[in-house]
Image: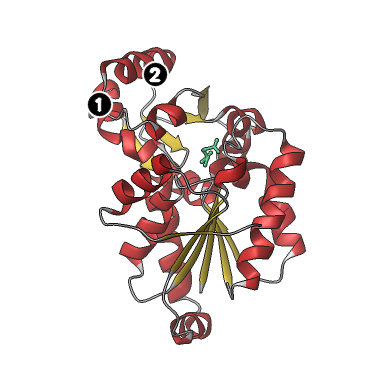
Amino acid sequence: MIGIFDSGVGGLTVARAIEQALPDLPMVYFGDIARTPYGSKSPDTIRTCSCRNTEFLLAQGAQLLVIACNTAASVASDLLRRLYPVPVFEVITPAIDQALCLSSHGRIGVIGTRATIASEVYRHGLHAREPHLSVFSQPCPLLVPLVEEGWLRRRETKMILRRYLHPLKCRDIDTLILGCTHYPLLHELIRQRMGRRVRLIDSSRAVALHLADALQQAPALLKQLKQTGQPSRFFVSDRTEAAARMADRIFGRPMQLERVEV
Ligand code: DGL
C-alpha cells in the first residue's frame, strides 16, 4: 500500500491527486488532526510527530511513504529516509523540478506555513539546482485556518490573499509554488490575484506525477503495491465535523475517516 501522512486532512489533496494518477493502487492515509497545525510548531516537534506517523503507516502495511505535508517534508524528510526501510517521496522536490521547468525568467515565489518558509527548504533546493535564480518566499499563516473554515471564496480571504501576494507581485515573479497542502483549494483565487502570466505549481499534483513516473521505472515495486488486495483506508488521530466536511470537499465524495489513537 502507498502510505501517506499529513498533519490533518489537507493532505487529502495529495491523496486525491495520487488516486487520479494511480487509480489501481490502494493507499493508507494518516491525518494527525489531534496535533494539527504543524506549521506553527518547532522542527523537533514536527520530526517527532513525523516518526510516529510513519511507524503507524508501516504497521498498517505501507510499502512506500509519501510525506504529503509540506511542513513535515521540509524538516523531516532526511530523517525519515535514514530511519525507515521504505522509499520516501515528498512534496517539495517534485514542486522544485516543475518550477525549474516552467519558470521563464528565473523569478520564483514560494508560499507556505511559517515552519516551511523558515526552513528555507525551497530556496536551498532551487539554488542548489540553479544558483542564479531569484527566489522570494512568503509565509501565509492565516490561509490554513481560512481553508479549514471553508472560506474559499469569501471577501475576507481575498483581502488576506491580496496582502500576502502583494510583495510577490511587486517582485514580478513568473512562477509561484503553492507550498502547502491547503493551497490547491485556493488555486482559483490565487490565479485571479497573480494573473495568467504567473505559472502556479501545485505540489500535490507534482508529487502524484513524480510518483507515477518513479513507479513506471520500478515495475517490481509497482507489482507488489498492486498485489496487496486491500481497500484504501483513511485514518485520523481525531475526528471533527469541520475535518470531515473538508475531507468530503477535497475528494468530492463522502469519505470514511477512521479514528485511531497514535
Ligand atoms: N499540512 C501543512 C502543510 O502542508 C499545513 C497545515 C499545518 O500547518 O499543519 O504545510
In percent of width and height, residue 214 lies at 48, 69
Give yes or no for contact between labels 1 and 2 (Cβ–Cβ under 8 Å): no
Residue 144's disc is none
71 up-or-down from 171: above or below: below
* Residue at image coords 65%, 64%: 56
Please tell me how crowded label 1 is: few (under 14), some (14-19), or many (20+) other residues with Cα within 10 Å: some
* Residue designated by label 2: 165
Residue 153's disc is 1
* Residue at image coords 31%, 54%: 251
Between 126 and 147, the one nearer to me in the picture? 147
The quarter holding residue 100 reads top left
- Is 46 left or right of 243, judged from the image as shown? right
- Is 154 left or right of 5, judged from the image as shown? left
- Callout 1, which amino acid? Arg
- Callout 2, which amino acid? Leu
Between 120 and 260, the one nearer to me in the picture? 260
- Is 187 left or right of 225, judged from the image as shown? left
* Residue at image coords 22%, 29%: 196
Secondary structure under tag 1 reads loop
In percent of width and height, residue 79 lies at 74, 54
* Separation (CA) of disc 1 from disc 2: 16 Å
What is the quadrant of the C terminus in the image? bottom right
